[in-house]
Amino acid sequence: MSQQQRPNDVSIDDIPVDVSNTQSGEVDPAEVPEEIRSITRGLASEQPPANPLVVLKAARWWYIHGKGGTDPAFQWAIEWARHLAADTPSDVDQFDAFLEYLVTVGFADEKTALR
């Protein structure tokens, strides 16, 4: 019924959380799980995910493995989930910071490649 989990590798869904590498601020794009990579790239696209639960899944991963509450991918995912839940305009400056961050961590060579 329950999965065996090592103390340094826990999860609440099928995406593992490496406890020893939490909030390091150093994100290696090769270590981002495919599902999170897909959601994150979707958040940067012209047709972002419309399900706030999917968006929050990515937010959680970036919060844990990125810079915590200051991680731009986390902040954008939360902003997009807020937009979906409240149908309010999203913060354009925050979106731009998110795209710049994805370039910085190696998701793309330039922001336009993400769109």
Image (tube, rainbow, N blue to C red):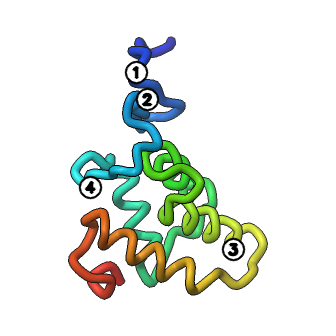
- How packed mark 3 is, by other alpha carbons closer than 10 Å (few <14, some 14-19, many 20 or more), is some
**Distance Cα–Cα, label 2 vs label 4:** 18 Å
Q: Mark 1 or 3 closer to N-term?
A: 1
Q: Position of residue 62 (x, y in %)?
A: 47, 52
**Distance Cα–Cα, label 1 vs label 2:** 5 Å
Residue beneath the point at 65% across and 81% down: 90
The residue type indicated by label 1 comes to Asn
**Distance Cα–Cα, label 3 vs label 2:** 30 Å
Residue beneath the point at 26% across and 46% down: 31
* Residue under pointer 2: 19
* Residue under pointer 3: 83
Residue beneath the point at 34% across and 57% down: 37
Q: Position of residue 41 (x, y in %)?
A: 37, 68
Q: Are marks 1 and 2 in contact (CB under 8 Å)?
A: yes
The residue type indicated by label 3 comes to His
Query: Does 77 sit left or right of 83 as displayed?
Result: left
The image's mark for residue 29 is 4
